[in-house]
């Protein structure tokens, strides 16, 4: 491969859902680029739309201070795709060429994109349009292929676990079934980790379509043992076996989380109330999982991948996602990961360990 020109100036943007750790990662990239490698940093606002509209400014070293513990993203974010950008004037355009033009006007040598699965795909399309890119995997969902873990995930699991801890006392006091719906889009990583850490009796994830009757039987057997309450952790993307089979038979996709008529948590609560006759309540934890300061683990992770990205930029290595593999930072070619989602393997060790302490996943109990 011909030697790529050195990287002297980068643009950095955040896209997709926000998450704790984003500012810690921005800080790591910015501080390392400027102080260690003499690379100038342009902050680009509001994701790809901001790039297309040239909403960017030069950031000085001191502007990256105070970001390590700050939730959200100082750059703002958005879910616009370069191919379908809703500009500030309300028009919707194919903005790939516009992004390329702004990239040149800003004098960028590389674009650093922090984002989830959609952002990886969007960064790849810009790379194919001639821009140099490096991406950092960001999402509470932990569903980005190519990395063992993403920053944002540990904080979401911590928040969800604390919620489950708190639900135990009210469930026991009222002899109720308490259902907690957590985020994760089409993956069950948050529900699995928080469910096990919080001691949920039942964990329902998209990767294991559940049978409500099996779940109800678990609740009943707990009752027979004097445990007159149950805690159910449900991923927002979880579906019952009946729903999965019906969609397959009809040849249609299961609805996206935002298109569901009834949320997963509400559905499970209604099913269990009908099948068990017990009082049932549900809580949708929602955006609380994406708020506030990152956990120390997410701060460490964001700092590692951000500074590793700066080292790659200093070497002129682009076209990669910066991931974590077996606790090492790795550079994964963007083409390899942009179109894949990392879901929970049904034989994941954590599922095996959970079953050994009697956790029900709605398939066999
Ligand atoms: O991808 C992160 C995430 O929080 C998902 O878990 C959730 O389904 C989605 O974003 C919500 O999207 P939005 O912020 O656009 O409502």
Image: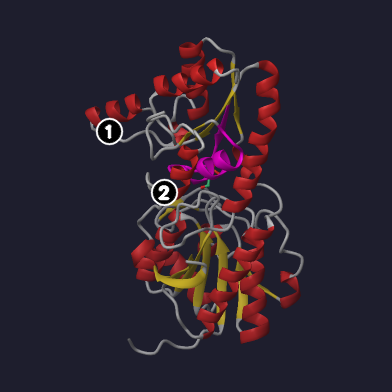
Label 2 CB less than 8 angstroms from ligand 1: no
Q: Could you say whether the residue bearing mark 2 is in a helix, strand or loop?
A: loop
Q: Could you say which is closer to the camera, residue 290 or residue 359?
A: 359
Across and down, in percent, residue 214 comes to: 41, 23
| CB at disc 1 and ligand 1 closer than 8 Å | no
Q: Where's the N terminus, which quadrant?
A: bottom left
The verdict on residue 241 being magenta is: no
Q: Is any atom of residue 353 visible in this view?
A: yes
- Residue 262, how many percent across, how many down? 47, 24
Which portion, as a residue range, is magenta? 179-200
| In the rendered image, the vertical position of residue 305 relative to residue 69, given as above or below | below
Q: Residue at x 71, y 70 (%)?
A: 64
Figure quadrant of the C terminus: top left
Outermost residue toward the front in this view: 225
Numbered circle sitting on residue 348: 2
Render colour scheme:
secondary structure
Q: Percent position (x, y) of residue 195?
A: 55, 38
The residue tagged with tag 1: helix, strand or loop?
Answer: loop
Mark yes or no: residue 290 visible.
Answer: no
Q: Is residue 91 above or below residue 176?
A: below
Badge 1: how crowded within 10 Å, few (<14), some, or many (20+)? few
Q: Residues within 10 Å of mark 2 (few under 14, many from 20)?
A: few
Mark number for residue 252? 1
Residue in the foreground of this view, choosing between 240 and 186: 240
Residue 65's image quarter? bottom right
């Amino acid at each position: 491969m011909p030697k790529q020109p050195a990287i002297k100036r980068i643009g950095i943007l955040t896209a997709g859902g926000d998450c704790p750790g984003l500012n810690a990662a921005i800080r790591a990239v910015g501080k390392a680029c400027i102080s260690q490698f003499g690379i100038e940093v342009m902050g680009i606002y509001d994701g790809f739309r901001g790039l297309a509209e040239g909403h960017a400014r030069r950031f000085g070293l001191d502007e990256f201070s105070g970001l390590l513990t700050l939730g959200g993203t100082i750059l703002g974010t958005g879910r616009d795709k370069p191919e379908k950008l809703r500009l500030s004037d309300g028009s919707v355009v194919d903005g790939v060429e516009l992004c390329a033009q702004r990239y040149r006007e800003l004098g960028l040598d590389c674009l650093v994109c922090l984002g989830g699965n959609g952002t990886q795909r969007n960064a790849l399309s810009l790379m194919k349009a001639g821009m140099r890119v490096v991406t950092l995997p960001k999402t509470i969902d932990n569903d980005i292929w190519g990395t063992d873990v993403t920053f944002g995930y540990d904080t979401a699991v911590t928040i969800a676990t604390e919620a489950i801890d708190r639900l135990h006392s009210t469930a026991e006091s009222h002899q109720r079934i308490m259902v907690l719906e957590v985020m994760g889009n089409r993956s069950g990583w948050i529900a699995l980790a928080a469910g096990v850490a919080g001691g949920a009796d039942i964990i329902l994830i998209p990767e294991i379509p559940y049978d409500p009757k099996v779940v109800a039987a678990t609740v009943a057997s707990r009752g027979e043992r004097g445990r007159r309450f149950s805690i159910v952790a449900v991923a927002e993307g979880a579906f019952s076996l009946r729903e999965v089979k019906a969609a397959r038979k009809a040849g249609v996709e299961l609805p996206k989380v935002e298109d569901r008529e009834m949320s997963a948590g509400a559905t499970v609560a209604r099913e269990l109330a009908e099948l068990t006759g017990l009082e049932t309540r549900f809580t949708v934890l929602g955006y609380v999982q994406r708020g506030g300061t990152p956990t120390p683990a997410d701060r460490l992770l964001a700092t590692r991948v951000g500074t590793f990205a700066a080292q790659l930029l200093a070497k002129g290595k682009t076209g990669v996602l910066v991931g974590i593999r077996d606790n090492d930072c790795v550079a994964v070619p963007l083409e390899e990961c942009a179109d894949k989602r990392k879901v929970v393997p049904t034989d994941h060790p954590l599922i095996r360990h959970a079953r050994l302490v009697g956790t029900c996943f709605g398939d066999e109990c």
